[in-house]
Amino acid sequence: MTDPKNARQPRSEIVLYQTEDGRNCVEVRLERETVWLTINQMAELFQVDKSGISRHLKNVYETGELR
């Protein structure tokens, strides 16, 4: 069994920024093909309030679209 202390942790970096012409961009460096954004990061990326992100995520789970 692998010792958790020695287990390799996935390394990723997420950079949200706005270009000079006002476009929002996301740059992602990742391992193992999984990207996780916090609600704050999603709200910033899509320029919406956190409550909008929370509401949409709740609807996705309630409708069974994502399990």
Image: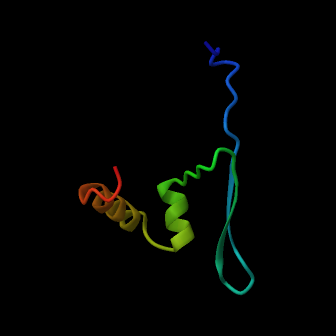
The front one of 24 and 28 is 28
Residue at screen point 55% across, 67% down: 44
Identify the image quadrant of residue 20.
Answer: bottom right
Vertical order, 2 against 27 (above or below): above
Q: Where residue 11 sits: x, y (%)? A: 70, 42
Vertical order, 57 against 12 (above or below): below
Which residue is outermost to the right? 20
Q: Where residue 25 sits: x, y (%)? A: 66, 72
Q: Where residue 6 sits: x, y (%)? A: 70, 19
- Describe residue 62's horizontal placement relative to residue 41 as left or right: left
The front one of 11 and 33 is 33
Vertical order, 41 against 47 (above or below): above
Which residue is outermost to the left? 62
Which residue is outermost to the bottom? 21
Quadrant including the N terminus:
top right
- Describe residue 62's horizontal placement relative to residue 34 as left or right: left
Residue at screen point 66% across, 84% down: 22
> How was this image coloured?
rainbow
Residue at screen point 51% across, 74% down: 47
> In the rendered picture of this protein, how many numbered marks are placed on residues?
0
Q: Where residue 31 sits: x, y (%)? A: 69, 45
The front one of 49 and 8 is 8
- Describe residue 33's horizontal placement relative to residue 63 as left or right: right
